[in-house]
Amino acid sequence: MSGLKLSNWCLAGILPISSGRVVPEIFAGLTLAAIAIPEVMGYTKIAGTPVITGLYTLLLPMALFSLFGSSRHLVVGADSATAAILATSLAGMAATGSANYLALAGFLALMVGVLLIVASVARIGFMADFLSRTVLTGFLTGVGIQVALHSLSGMTGITLPHADGLESVARLLPLLSSINLKATVVALGVLIIIFGLKFISKTIPGAIVALALATIASGFLDLKSTLSVVGSVPHGLPDLSLPKIDWSLSLIWQLGPTALAMLMVILAQSAATARAYAAKYEENLDESTDLRALGLANLGAGLTGTFVVNGSPTKSQMVESAGGRSQLSMLVTSAVVLLVLLFFTGLLADLPEAALSALVFTIGVDLIDLKGLRQIYRTRRPEFWVSMATIIVVVAAGVGPGIVLAIVLSLIVHTRHGYRPVNLLLTSDAAGIWHARPLKSLALAASGVMIYRFTHSMYYANADRMAEEIRRLTVQRNEGLRYFCVDISCVDDVDFTALQTLKSLQAELAEKNVELLFAHMLDDPGAHSRLQLVKAFGAKKVLATIEEVLTYTQSSVGKSAQSPASS
């Protein structure tokens, strides 16, 4: 089977590849492994699962997406947002870190995997567009704040029952007197090393350097006698099996909202990242293929005892910076993780929990997008307050309510744009060039002719607003107005409510001796909307261009002027 034919069903993110690209891809894969291995261990602190499960996310799930995805750049693995959603949803169902908790996490990964495959078959990747960048920025910033706050207990050596956001801080404050100074020193040391090396060069894997030094110091100074450490980590490959839980419709119903919330986050983050890199490198991208591959990756996660995986914008950027240009880099990373699982998990036993918590703190800080919030504030002040509302809910109430609010606010923002379109009046200058004027100008396109451009699809939510604008324009221009033309060059659909509203307006305008016309219908004779308009108003009233409208109105004026003489 040729490479081209093979890439039709797998390896689309790898093939074609030249021999000269192999070494750079291997280097990028090794770089990603150095960065991702400590990171995913930190994500397990967020998710509430054993450290080894973080490594599992980089094994089969990453390899499955690399083999079956179409994006050459998207890196798939553990993610802070979905890990936080997981912890919030499972906190009341099982003890954090227990076998039952881990089984529920795996079951949730299977549910998300099935939803992603259904989404790929139904081609509903467009749903990602409904989670606006404004709301997503607020949501991820809120998650970052919550993750950073929640990591404070581990950094100070204080064990707290699971709590979200401000509640975790409230529970932490009374226990400040019992801070473990050794844990705090370890955490501060890790933070200094990570941020210091990042300041020197972003290419240095500060996280793995910091955790390695913390592990060496822990073993040399025998800190495990006074500090919590990771302890014995199982080596070898994960078992390939279904989660050991009582499968039931009630459990699916209970976890359904969480799975849907994760689906929306995965759609938004993964699709946006894959699109950005495909556009940058002018590469083909099949979103349905990527959704299917993400589904397979999550099925792999559920079957190997780990939690939901997602596309990572930051890891994708890291691989690109290291020179990776295909999924071969990610396969190299999976191979490195395989070696770690087989031979080197014993090195993790002395790693202090405080060091991992400090790493989680840096992950949370990285999610706080102050630059993006400033840009939104300067550009769209109302949308900034939408972002702030999302942040507050995520921090105060948790990730679950936060993602629900994020989805609802995104839909409200989308609906508001369609509900209140900025419509215009058209007029031409002496050279015959058409210009858009605000409605308050009451500008005429010609003597007795007003042309009103509607800039959105006409549907039930904006039909009344359209009617109000047309009534106001015709009342204020009540003298000499004979023709009112609706320019629908920006309209791709007219629903039943809007059509009935237009028919009512036609009758109202006729009583004022004003004729309703339409221009610039999309040039598709089979379009349902066009057929509706022609059927409702007649072919003579639905004209192709503004010039035809002016010709029609002038000929009508001429006929009116001749009628007295002929009589």
Image (tube, rainbow, N blue to C red):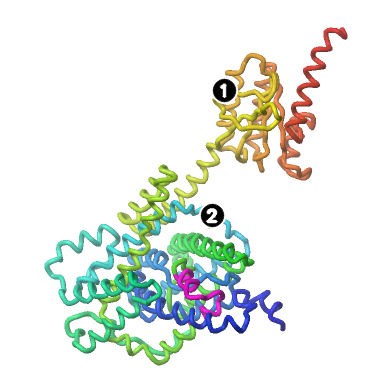
Q: Is the magenta stretch mostly helix, strand or loop?
A: helix
Q: Position of residue 185 (x, y in %)?
A: 19, 75
- 132 above or below 78? above
Residue matched to label 2: 129
Magenta region, residue range:
315-333
Separation (CA) of disc 2 from disc 1: 35 Å
State the SS at label 1.
Answer: helix
Hey, what amino acid is under mark 1? Arg
Mark on residue 383? none
Residue sitting at x 65%, y 40%: 491
**Residue placed at 30% from the left, 68% from the top?**
361
Q: Residues within 10 Å of mark 2 (few under 14, many from 20)?
A: some
Question: Looking at the image, which residue sits at the far front?
Answer: 431
Q: In this view, does 397 lie to the left or right of 172?
A: right
As drawn, is 371 to the left or to the right of 447? Answer: left
Whole-percent x, y for residue 521 in the image:
72, 38
User: Is residue 95 among what the camera can see?
Assistant: no
Q: Is mark 2 on a helix, strand or loop?
A: helix
| Mark 1 surroundings within 10 Å by alpha-carbon count, few (fewer than 14), some (14 through 19), many (20 or more) | some
Q: Where is residue 14 in the image (x, y as percent from the top left)?
A: 60, 77
Give the quarter of the figure containing the N terminus: bottom right
Q: Do the residues labelled 2 and 1 touch (CB within 8 Å)?
A: no
In the image, farthest residue toward the right: 566
| Amino acid residing under circle 2 | Asp
Sequence-wise first label, 2 or 1: 2
Specify the farthest residue to the bottom: 343
